[in-house]
Image (spheres, helix red, strand yellow):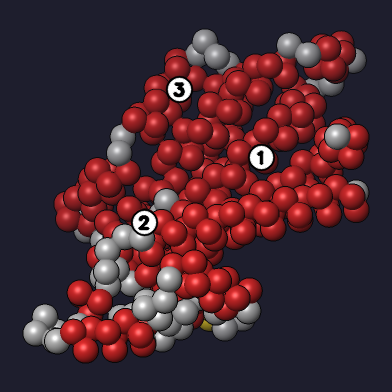
């Protein structure tokens, strides 16, 4: 197990290094933020002075080395626009994005797994066909359009839910959380459902396929021959054996929920990292964009590492194969 963990940690370090180079070059090679930050009537001396203050007068390779040295110490530079630490801005917005992503993931799991099990156990029933039809809609409908329709229905027409913002929050370990207040729950419900729509469809189809495959296995036939109750067969023998692909996909999709919450946060004015990213891109605030992208990459790597560990715990053969390789 130790060799397995060390190998995964080394691979994660290489991924982070390569991604830091790609992100830095991709972001710093686009546009010139000085044109947006300085007065259009400024002379060349003012422009050069501003570039020197922002560290943009150095060659790109030297800027990367300086950035890498600072990043290893947790410093991603100072925001060109806000004049404060880019990482502090990201960390200030991160709890809102994580809360939204966790809420969306819980909705996807709570709805997706039972519906997928039902569709897999009764594939020819009208309810199963309806579930699979709705899952196709979940894959097909664009997130921004669904978000606007939810606002039109529940906020404008019915007036049940607020259309924007995070609502009232309470602090947990120094971080604000909305789900502990009724107002916060009302604010998070629509954006979480909107963000979870695609994931619900994915979990449904994955669970259904795994259930149908598991029902054909010998261990399920033996369990039925022994006279075990259907609930025990499904809950112990079927569900346990389809958890590995479900855990893997859920883990990876949690990373994508964080990374691609940008659209949902923009539609519902949710004050998370995605909304900050859009604002920073419009203003070419490079340190904030780089800090956001590398933070998301780091979260992806950490989530993959946790998924690998869970994978190896659920199926020790994976750990042994990795050590043999």
**In the rendered structure, which disc, 2 or 1, sits on the residue that comes first in sequence?**
1
Q: What residue appears at the point 62 percent right and 59 percent down from the top-left corner?
A: 17
Eye-nearest disc, 2 or 3: 2
Instruction: Report whether 255 appears left or right of 127.
Output: right
Q: Earlier in the sequence, mark 2 or mark 3?
A: 3
Percent coordinates x, y for residue 225 in the rendering:
87, 11
Residue bearing the label numbered 3: 132
Mark 2 touching mark 3, by CB under 8 A?
A: no
- Cβ atoms at labels 1 and 3 below 8 Å apart: no
**Could you tell me if residue 106 is visible in this image?**
no
| Farthest residue, direction left | 41
What's the CA distance linking mark 2 and mark 1? 23 Å
Q: Is residue 91 above or below residue 146?
A: below
Does the image show residue 108? yes
Corner quadrant of residue 299: bottom right
**Residue in the foreground of this view, choosing between 17 and 245:** 17
Residue 160, above or below 81? above
Tag 1's secondary structure?
A: helix
Q: Which residue is mark 2?
A: 262
In this orientation, which residue lies closer to the viewer: 11 or 216? 11
Instruction: Identify residue for label 1.
Output: 248
């Amino acid at each position: 197990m130790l060799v397995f963990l060390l190998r995964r940690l080394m691979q994660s370090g290489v991924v982070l290094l390569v991604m830091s180079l790609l992100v830095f070059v991709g972001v710093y090679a686009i546009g010139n933020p000085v044109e947006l930050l300085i007065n259009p009537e400024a002379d060349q001396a003012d422009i050069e002075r501003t570039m020197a203050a922002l560290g943009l007068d150095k060659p790109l390779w030297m800027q990367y080395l300086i950035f890498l040295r600072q990043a290893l110490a947790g410093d991603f530079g100072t925001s060109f626009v806000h004049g404060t630490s880019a990482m502090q801005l990201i960390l200030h917005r991160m709890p809102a994005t994580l809360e939204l992503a966790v809420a969306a993931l819980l909705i996807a799991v709570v709805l997706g797994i039972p519906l997928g099990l039902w569709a897999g156990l009764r594939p020819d029933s009208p309810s199963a066909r309806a579930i699979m039809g709705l899952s196709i809609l979940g894959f097909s409908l664009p997130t921004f359009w669904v978000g606007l329709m939810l606002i039109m229905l529940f906020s404008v027409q019915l007036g049940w839910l607020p259309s924007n913002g995070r609502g009232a929050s309470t602090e947990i370990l120094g971080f604000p959380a909305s789900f502990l207040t009724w107002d916060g729950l009302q604010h998070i419900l629509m954006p979480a459902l909107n963000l979870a729509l695609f994931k619900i469809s994915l979990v449904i189809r994955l669970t259904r396929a795994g259930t149908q495959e598991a029902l054909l296995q010998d261990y399920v036939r033996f369990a039925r021959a022994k006279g075990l109750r259907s609930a025990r067969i499904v809950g112990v023998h079927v569900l346990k054996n389809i958890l590995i692909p479900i855990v893997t996909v859920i883990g990876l999709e949690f990373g994508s929920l964080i990374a691609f919450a940008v659209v949902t946060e923009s539609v519902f004015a949710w004050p998370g990292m995605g909304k900050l990213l859009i604002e920073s891109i419009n203003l070419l605030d490079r340190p904030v964009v780089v800090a956001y992208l590398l933070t998301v990459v780091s979260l992806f790597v950490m989530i993959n590492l946790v998924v690998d560990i869970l994978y190896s715990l659920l199926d020790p053969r994976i750990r042994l194969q990795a050590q043999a390789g």
